[in-house]
């Protein structure tokens, strides 16, 4: 088919759109009422400056150096006094022991001398008896009688002297015992009185030191509690008025307690000084009293020793004199015994001149 196609002539009708209403609309003027000013300033709410409630640094409550030194010096002197007294007692004990040993040695020597003399006499008597026995029965009996009589007499002389000597020494020992006993009683009273004063002074000094130590501990405890309370106060919120007020009161109370304890400690330190001085004086007085008591005892002991020594000297003199008299009696008896033996020999038993004790040989006529 033919492509020669023509589009028909088509006209669009003239369509008129009606006029739109006017859009000239004005929003009414709605005025928002003015807001109040927002220029709001937070009132200044600063807390008033709080006073410094921290506890002051309490001084170290140690006893003053003078108190420490006085107490130490008093203790050292007391120890020295006791040591000196102990040394004196030990020296006295050693001296007494030495005196006792010397007396025992002297007594032993005297006994040994007596035993030796008795042995010597017995030997002579035995010689005489032997000689008399060799001379015959009659001579023997006479010699035995002479010797027995002499022996009894000599022993009686010695026994009387020994009894007198024992009486003297016994009386001397009693007197010496009374002297030493009286001296010991006086010395004990002096020491007891002085020691009583010193003991009281030691108790006072110990009590003062104990009180001071207790106050120092109390102050240290108050310091610790005060520091802890102050730290808690510092950490507490500033608007927590109730708790802060309680803590404030507690800090003040602790501060006051510490001040009172400090004053007491000052007084206690002075008391330590005073009691230390009193103790030093008491110990010195006790030392002097000890020396006085020791002198009393030493004087009495010397006097007692003198009394005893004098009695022993007199007893020894009596014993010596008795021994001499006994020796004379025995010597006389020996002479008589020899004479009896000689008389018996003259009658025919022995040759004249026959000696006693084997000096000459016995022969028959």
Image: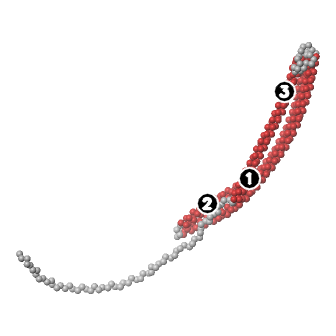
**Element type at mark 2:** helix
- Residue density around tag 1, few if under 14, some if 14–19, many if 20 or more, within 10 Å: some
Q: In whole angstroms, how far apart are the C-alphas of marks 1 and 2? A: 35 Å
What residue appears at the point 63 percent right and 65 percent down from the top-left corner?
A: 256
Q: Which of marks 3 and 1 is nearer the N terminus?
A: 1
270 to 126, vertically: above or below: below
Q: Residue 364 carries which label?
A: none
Residue 108 is situated, as x and y percent measured from the top left of the image, at 81, 33
- Residue density around tag 2, few if under 14, some if 14–19, many if 20 or more, within 10 Å: some
What residue appears at the point 61 percent right and 65 percent down from the top-left corner?
A: 55
275 to 44, vertically: above or below: above
- Residue density around tag 3, few if under 14, some if 14–19, many if 20 or more, within 10 Å: few
Outermost residue toward the top? 365
According to the picture, the residue beneath numbered tag 2 turns out to be 221
According to the picture, the residue beneath numbered tag 3 turns out to be 119
According to the picture, the residue beneath numbered tag 1 turns out to be 77
């Amino acid at each position: 088919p033919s492509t020669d196609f023509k589009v028909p002539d088509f006209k669009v009708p003239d369509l008129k759109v009606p006029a739109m209403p006017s859009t000239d609309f004005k929003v009414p003027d709605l005025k928002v009422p003015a807001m109040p000013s927002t220029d709001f300033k937070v009132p200044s709410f600063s807390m008033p400056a709080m006073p410094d409630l921290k506890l002051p640094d309490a001084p170290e409550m140690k006893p003053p150096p003078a108190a420490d030194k006085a107490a130490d010096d008093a203790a050292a002197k007391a120890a020295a006094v006791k040591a000196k007294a102990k040394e004196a007692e030990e020296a006295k004990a050693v001296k007494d022991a030495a005196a006792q040993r010397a007396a025992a040695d002297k007594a032993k020597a005297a006994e040994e001398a007596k035993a030796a003399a008795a042995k010597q006499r017995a030997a002579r008597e035995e010689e005489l008896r032997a000689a008399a026995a060799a001379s015959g029965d009659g001579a023997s009996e006479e010699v035995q009688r002479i010797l027995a009589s002499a022996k009894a007499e000599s022993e009686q002389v010695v026994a009387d002297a020994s009894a007198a000597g024992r009486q003297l020494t016994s009386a001397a020992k009693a007197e010496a015992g009374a002297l030493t006993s009286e001296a010991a009683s006086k010395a004990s009273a002096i020491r007891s009185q002085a020691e009583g004063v010193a003991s009281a002074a030691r108790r006072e000094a110990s009590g003062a030191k104990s009180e001071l130590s207790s106050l120092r501990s109390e102050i240290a405890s108050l310091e610790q509690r005060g520091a802890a309370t102050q730290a808690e106060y510092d950490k507490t919120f500033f608007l927590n008025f109730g708790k802060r007020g309680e803590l404030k009161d507690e800090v003040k109370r602790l501060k006051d307690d510490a001040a009172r304890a400090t004053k007491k400690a000052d007084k206690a330190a002075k008391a330590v000084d005073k009691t230390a001085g009193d103790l030093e004086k008491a110990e010195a007085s006790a030392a002097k009293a000890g020396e006085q008591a020791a002198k009393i005892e030493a004087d009495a002991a010397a006097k007692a020793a003198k009394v005893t020594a004098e009695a022993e000297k007199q007893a020894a003199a009596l014993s010596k004199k008795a021994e001499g008299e006994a020796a004379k009696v025995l010597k006389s008896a020996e002479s008589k015994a020899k004479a009896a033996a000689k008389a018996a020999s003259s009658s025919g038993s022995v040759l004249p001149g026959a000696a006693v004790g084997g000096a000459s040989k016995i022969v028959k006529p």
